[in-house]
Image: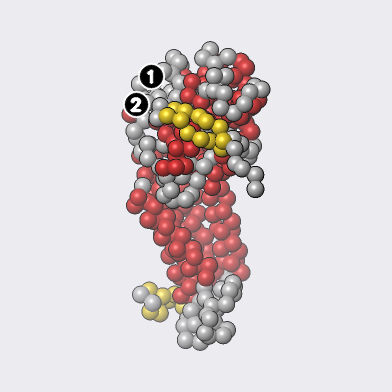
Amino acid sequence: MEEKKFRVESDLLGELNVPEEAYYGVQTQRAINNYHISRKRMCDYPDYVIAVAYVKLAAVETNHALGQIDDKIADAIAQACREIIGGKLHENFVTDMVQGGAGTSVNMNANEVIANRALEILGHKKGEYQYCYPNDHVNCGQSTNDVYPTTIRLALIRMNRNLIVSLSALIAAFRKKGEEFKHVIKMGRTQLQDAVPMTSGQEFNAFANTLEEEIANLNRNAALLHEINMGGTAIGTGLNAAPGFPKVCAERLTELTGMEFVAGADLVEATPDTGAYVSYSSALKRLAVKLSKICNDLRLLASGPRCGLNEINLPPMAPGSSIMPGKVNPVIPEVTNQTCFKVIGNDTTV
């Protein structure tokens, strides 16, 4: 077996061995050593990695426009960012998603990967930071405290778009069943007791309509994520950022992503503000509560088949018992419920 090779990098804490082939550097290596918490890494969330690359691309283009970085280095950093946006180098984003330091390890992981790829583009070796430095060049005019929240906001907006696509498909499926069952008469119930007649079509259309409301609610709350604090640096005062950075960076990020971002009117206020995350998480919880209710209805309506309601047949997805041949369980509503409970629990954490 070939012996693994390392390069030596150093930071304010001293020297550390980093795998020779790795694009990350010493601070990321410290994060690898320090954090074995969730075992979920940045690279497990491609939208998150792409989001931080967009933020770094907007920042370097801003710094270049404001005369902070020369053409050659700016071009190399920009190329590295675009490669990451295109799906390359993601395996080098290895920091655990749960880490101390308010996101510094995440920001430095990105800075180091981008810097080392830029060094290659410039014709240098990984770790030769005198030619392109993670802090002074890739992180120029920035802090973890503006990069990290901006990245989270962009990632959530991207993921919200994907969620809307999936939710729309589910709504369409319920509407299709609503049309299919529009002439099927059944008993409506309150407190599980017979109430008044209805159609199964009305039932499935109600499922569709209650979820349709959630698309507007998700988008309404995702809109709060479009205000960013880039250029506020450490605490919102803009220390070490070039004059005009916040406005220009928001404009560049808008142009690059096609999503409209605006700089916060008061960056000292915007930097610690977590209200948008709370609101969006609440919207996810509201959707989860509704989905859970639908799952419980479907499971109850399909109960039996001999000694339950047995009004509908759910598609058989897997054998339901190791001891009772022929038993089939409603596994999809059940696993959806588990996911909903996870979302509800996450909202408590947020």
Q: Circles 2 and 1: CB distance less than 8 Å?
A: yes
- Disc 2 designates what residue? 235
Give above or below for 286 relative to 83.
Answer: below
Amino acid type shown at disc 1? Leu
Would residue 87 be found to the left or right of residue 101 on screen? right
Residue at 37% from the left image edge and 40% from the top image edge: 100
In percent of width and height, residue 219 lies at: 48, 44
In percent of width and height, residue 294 lies at: 46, 65
Question: Quarter of the image holding residue 117?
Answer: top right
Q: Can residue 173 be seen in this view?
A: yes
Residue at 46% from the left image edge and 21% from the top image edge: 141
At mark 1, the secondary structure is loop
Give above or below for 331 relative to 325.
Answer: above
Give above or below for 239 relative to 283.
Answer: above
Judging depth in this view, the residue of 178 and 18 nearest the camera is 18
Residue at 54% from the left image edge and 78% from the top image edge: 320
In percent of width and height, residue 205 lies at: 52, 63
Amino acid type shown at disc 2? Ile
Judging depth in this view, the residue of 344 and 13 nearest the camera is 13
Give the total number of marks visible in the rendering: 2
Q: Can residue 150 be seen in this view?
A: no
At mark 2, the secondary structure is loop
Q: How crowded is mark 2: few (under 14 residues within 10 Å), some or many (20 or more)?
A: some
Cα–Cα span, label 2 and label 1: 8 Å
In percent of width and height, residue 291 lies at: 46, 61
- Disc 1 designates what residue? 239
